[in-house]
Structures are given as structure tokens and as C-alpha cells.
Amino acid sequence: MSSPHVGGVTDFSTHPGFAKVFSDRLTLGVFFPIEAYTGDVPRMEDQEDLAEAVEALGFDALWFRDVPLRDPTFGDVGQIYDPWVYLAHIAAHTRAIALVTGAIVLPLRHPLHVAKAAASVDRLSGGRLVLGVATGDRLGELVAFGIDPDRRGELFESHLRAIRDAWREALALDVLPKPPLGDIPVMITGRVRHHLDWIAAHADAWATYPRPLAAQAALVAEWQRASAGKPFAQSLYIDLDRSPSAPPRQIHLGWSLGRDALVQLLVELRRAGVGHIALNLKYGRRAAADVVDELGNEVLPRVRSVDAVSHTPAP
């Protein structure tokens, strides 16, 4: 199976992972670790069972962080495990849900290693990888790897070019395997020290942090103008209250709220043009299994019902 690169752009409509994450409705994902915890190191208990539950309940994606070193001042270490190892592990425990990196820090990694690892995961998972990439914002980590933080934008650009060349071309010393489509969808996360027009030209989608609704809507509109309508994703921390009617209260990069307010927020973000939202449960007060169950059984159906109505053509 192959797909032509028209003007350097691949048609990912047949890529299972990209089609899952970005469709004609709002899609939802969940970050690892799927748990609430204090401090910066999660317990990582029952993650395989929770991943299987997330998939069974109809979520669209599982998200994986890239945090090579622990910096206690930063607040969290993601899922602890190396992202490529953990991607392969979770891919073996799931069947169809998209696998998204949020995000691989390109300046820290040799591009040929990233190209081979990403193509391996994409093939072994049946085309489920969406490769989120970033420059990295943990400056101490960059310095520990011998990277000048001021060069991370330049390194990001050159590494991304080398990765896609390794996928698309037969090199003298070649990188195998090649992706089934000859390419893998790349989602740039954050500004990567480049102008939005550059991001639009080099990314298949863009992901960023949450903002107040009006500000996020304005940013989505700016992105859609720059990219001719490419998909937009964002993260969102939530503390799902036991009371469905609990009003929203702001927390770090998100909200503590009941499911009624969460549904309203998700619908408003969809109307603002957000295509995918990745939920992070770190600051919750409830067991992750209970939260995942409520999200899957009570929130997802309501969001999709409203989304379907809002996209129904007028008679």
C-alpha cells in the first residue's frame, strides 16, 4: 500500500491513526499515566487494563509523553517508561485506538533513530501512530544532553527534515522499515520556535495547550487560515467531580468540574474548531477507573450526540 506525496504532502485519510484522531467530529484521547497522583512520579498501576477500558469505551487515542530525565522542579515525569518501549507495549494490549506521542523531543534524539522507531511502531500497530513532535521546554534536560537551548528550533527543523527523508526516500545506507504509506502523520506541538506559517507548511496537524475559550477560538481561526484547514488539537487537565452539576473551577491547564459542565466545554471547543482533545487526569481526586467509566458512558455519548446534530445538513 502506498500513497503519493503531492507537493510534499501525504494524504492520510487512509492512515488508521490519523483518521481516528481527526475526523468530522470531536475526538477524545487520554494521556498516560491514566491516574491521579500527587508529586511528579506516578504509580503506573493497572495501566494496561485502563488502556483496554479506554479503547472499549470508544475513546479515540492514547497519548504518550517523552521525558528522558526527571526534573523534580517541573512537576511530572509522564508515564516514566521510554516512549518507544511503552508504545510497543500498549500497542500489544490494544487493537484499534490511535497511539499519539505528545510529544517526542526532536533535539534530544538522533533523527535516524526516531525515523526507525516511529516506522516500527506504525507498522507493528497497524498504522496507528500519530507522531507528535516538539522542541522541548525543559531547558535543564537539553543542557544535560549537551544541547544548546538556543539551537533547539534549528535542530528541530533539520531533524524533522531528516526523519521524513528517511521515510520517503531510499538512502545509500537505508532506514528500514518504511511506513506503509511512505510517510507518518506529524503533529507539531507548540510553536517550536517557528512562525505559524512554517508550522502549517511542515505539519499535518498542530497541537497546543488550553486557553480561555475566546483566545483558543481566535488561535484556531489563525491556524486554519495559515494551514488551509489542517486539524487542531489541544490538551486539557480535568478533575471530574462526583456531582454531575458541579460548576467549573480552574486548575492547572484545565478545570475541576462536573460532567454537565465538561460536556458544555467540549461542545464549545468543538464549535471553536478544535478537532481533538487529550484529557489528563493527574490532578483528579477520584480513582482513574471510575473517571474513565463516567467519561466513556456519560460524557462521550452526549458530546457525540450534540456534535452529530450540529453537523446534520439542513433539509
Image: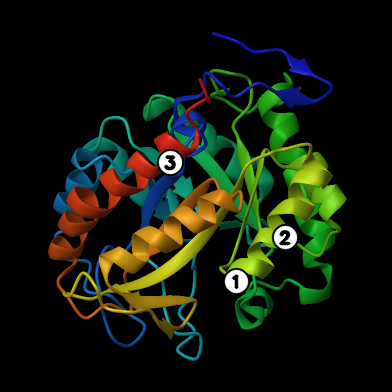
Residue placed under numbered mark 2 in the picture: 219
Residue occupying image coordinates x 46% and y 32%: 17
Decide if residue 224 is on the left or right side of residue 119: right
Q: Position of residue 111 (x, y in %)?
A: 67, 46
Three-letter amino acid code of the residue under disc 1: Arg
The residue most toward the front is 315
Cα gap from disc 2 to disc 3, whole angstroms: 21 Å
Residue placed under numbered mark 3 in the picture: 307
Q: Position of residue 56 (x, y in %)?
A: 19, 39
Three-letter amino acid code of the residue under disc 2: Leu
Residue placed under numbered mark 1 in the picture: 211
Q: Position of residue 150 (x, y in %)?
A: 83, 74
Could you say which disc has been placed on residue 61 in the image?
Answer: none
Residue occupying image coordinates x 42% and y 79%: 76
Sequence-wise, the earlier of marks 1 and 3 is: 1
Position of 199 relative to 310 (above/below):
below
